[in-house]
Image (cartoon, rainbow, N blue to C red):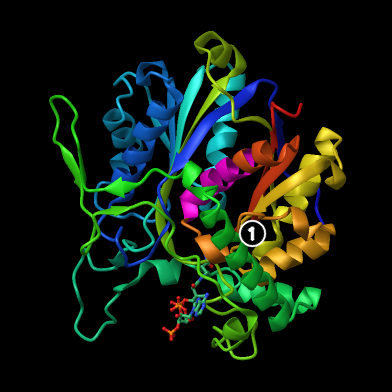
Amino acid sequence: MTSKGFFNAFNDVWMLDGVRTPMVDYCGAFSQLSPTDMGIKVAREILKRTGVPATDIGSVITGNMAPGDFGQFMLPRHIGLYAGVPQEVPALMAQRICGTGFELFRQAGEQIQAGACEAALVVGTESMTRNPIAAFDHRTGFKLGAPVGFKDYMWEALTDSAPGIDMIQTAENLAKQYGITRADVDAFASKSFAKAVAAQASGFLAGEIVPVANETFELDGYASRSMRLAGKAKEISADTHPRISPVEVLAGLRTVFPGGVQTGGNSSALVDAAAAAIVASGAYATAGGHQRLGRIAAAAVVGVPPEIMGIGPAPAIRLLLARTGLTLADIGRFEINEAQGAQTLAVGRELGLDLARLNVNGGATALGHPLAATGVRLTITLAREMQRSGVRWGISSACVGGGQGIALLVENPQAA
Ligand SMILES: CC(C)(COP(=O)(O)OP(=O)(O)OC[C@H]1O[C@@H](n2cnc3c(N)ncnc32)[C@H](O)[C@@H]1OP(=O)(O)O)[C@@H](O)C(=O)NCCC(=O)NCCS
């Protein structure tokens, strides 16, 4: 497996804290919320929780994959402005598909290390529900008898046209390559659900969630924006997908492809959510007396064959370890996105991972995978879990459609 790719080491770059919305099953209570508004919600909340004045933010770095409304071009700017960040401060949209959230931390690390800013607002946000039904061919009209181009953007976007397969098929390829059976995947998924349910019951997950209710965001001199929950919900304060899922129940679900291993029960759930963090220099944190949740120590990004895109975390983690001089045994916790169960198991087998250290509060099978928000969510959960369990080093990582892997190394300041 390749060890090429790029790598960053960061000396003094910190996540002060992070927060997220609940992750809500698609077509549910968040179905009327734009990614921009979910992003504003978490941006405002993280500024409040950290006590960082919005006027101290020197860079707004956002991620969003699918356009959730016609305002997506302005999403980075609107998240910053409606969070109170000064107009002079620039805002960026970064895109690395399922690796986007991690990429936001990586870019914040580069900016802070280069001295471009002292504190960055990082926001990943995704509405899977509001993926448009889109057509790209009709600006010039509809020719008689020609095919009408409207298609489900999400469904189409989950296919990689280069190898001509969708993301579930990339996991099926890994299942064959690593000898992973349906029973293996269902057993892994069942545990993911059980861990998430336990993390909800213990209150661990609630600690990183800001409840969402109907709300209006004001910005002096500009249009107000509103969030309205769908249906009768008054407030959503917990993830909606986790439920106890015995292996016997999962085993009864239909596979997406005949003869395959992936089902709706052992693949990442489709959810709507946003997550935000403040990333700052150590000097800034010290001067402001801010708490530090974790040090963003290093980042690695690699390319892998598109048809087995799900293996991406393995070489990314290998590169991270090779360049930092750490070993797998040094890493007390891993958060690796469960895009598909067979995919995560393949990464585990490729690396020889101790699965007891992996996704200990449940993974995307149970909690969901809101594409651009995922990396921010996983890195927040990782850093909080590292503090809870007292481990020093942790890695958050994901595979990336098209064939990439990305990984972040996080250090727990309380165990250093
Ligand atoms: C796998 C996938 C195609 C399934 O989509 P879907 O068919 O809409 O899935 P559903 O949620 O409707 O689940 C299918 C069935 O399983 C059931 N099910 C799902 N999870 C379950 C659980 N934990 N326990 C019991 N039943 C469950 C559903 O109730 C549904 O039953 P029904 O057909 O009787 O209504 C979709 O979830 C997916 O593509 N996930 C991966 C996303 C992805 O690849 N992201 C990017 C990574 S690169």
Bounds of the magenta segment: 371-383
In this view of the protein, can residue 14 be seen by the observer?
A: yes
Compared across the picture, whether 343 is left or right of 324 comes to left
Q: Relative to 66, say whether 284 is above or below.
A: above
Residue that carries the numbered disc 1 in the rendered image: 403
Image-quadrant location for residue 129 = bottom left
Name which residue lies at 58% across and 81% down: 250
Name which residue lies at 32% across and 36% down: 79
Q: Where's residue 356, x and y in %?
A: 76, 57
Compared across the picture, whether 41 is left or right of 410 comes to left
Front residue of 211/201: it is 201
Image-quadrant location for residue 75 = top left
Is the residue at mark 1 in contact range of ligand 1, meaning its CB lies under 8 Å from it?
no
Residue extending farthest to the top is 287
Image-quadrant location for residue 160 = bottom right
Q: Secondary structure at mark 1?
A: loop
If the image is split into quadrants, where does the C terminus sit? top right
Q: Which amino acid type is marked by label 1?
A: Gly
If the image is split into quadrants, where does the N terminus sit? bottom right
Determine if the magenta segment contains residue 249: no
Q: Where's residue 149, x and y in %?
A: 30, 74
Q: Main secondary structure of the magenta part?
A: helix
In this view of the protein, can residue 164 be seen by the observer?
A: no
Q: Relative to 184, say whether 258 is above or below.
A: below
Q: Relative to 268, say whether 3 is above or below.
A: above
